Amino acid sequence: MKTIKFLTSSALACLFAVGSIAQAEGEHSMTGCLAKAGDGVFSLTNVEGGTPATVAIAESAPDLSGHVGHKVEITGTTVAGADPTAHTMKVTAMKHVDAACP
């Protein structure tokens, strides 16, 4: 019984440590409407939570072109963008949430 408690505690500690590393590196997720801002340039608008209302996407590993106008969740890190006052992200993952967007 002590062994099971120890293993469970150890597993939970590892999970918390991995979560802390991801947070320390600044990776985060935001949900909103994917918009095309130019040739190969995208942004996230109507961001849930409203702060910021729009996110500029500087770079994306997943292909976003098929999801323009859809509600998506993007995950990535904050990077310096052309506009220093805008929240700009390098996207490492994208999850399709809904085909409709407000």
Image (cartoon, rainbow, N blue to C red):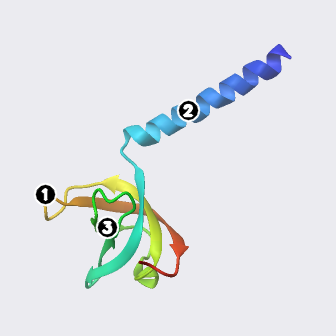
**Residue 24: quadrant of the picture:** top left
Residue at 37% of width from left, 68% of height from top?
60
* Foreground: disc 3 or disc 1: 1
**Label for residue 16?**
2
Instruction: Please indicate whether residue 55 sits to the left or right of residue 101 in the image.
Output: left
Q: CA distance from mark 2 to mark 1?
A: 33 Å
Q: Amino acid at mark 2?
A: Phe
Q: Residues within 10 Å of mark 3 (few under 14, many from 20)?
A: some
**Residue 11: quadrant of the picture:** top right
User: Residue 31: where, in percent of width, then height?
Assistant: 43, 63
Q: Nearer the viewer, residue 49 or 39?
A: 49
Q: Quadrant of the N terminus?
A: top right
Q: Are marks 2 and 3 in contact (CB under 8 Å)?
A: no
Residue at 30% of width from left, 60% of height from top?
89
Residue at 14% of width from left, 65% of height from top?
82
| Circle 3: element type | strand
Q: Nearer the viewer, residue 84 or 52?
A: 52
Q: Is residue 85 above or below residue 46?
A: above
| Circle 1: element type | loop
Name the residue at the top extreme.
Answer: 2
Earlier-in-chain disc, 3 versus 1: 3
Q: Are marks 3 and 1 in contact (CB under 8 Å)?
A: no
* Foreground: disc 2 or disc 3: 2
Q: Amino acid at mark 3?
A: Glu
Q: Is residue 39 above or below residue 28?
A: below
User: Residue 23: where, in percent of width, then height?
Assistant: 42, 40
Q: Amino acid at mark 1?
A: Pro
Q: Which residue is mark 3?
A: 59
Earlier-in-chain disc, 2 versus 3: 2
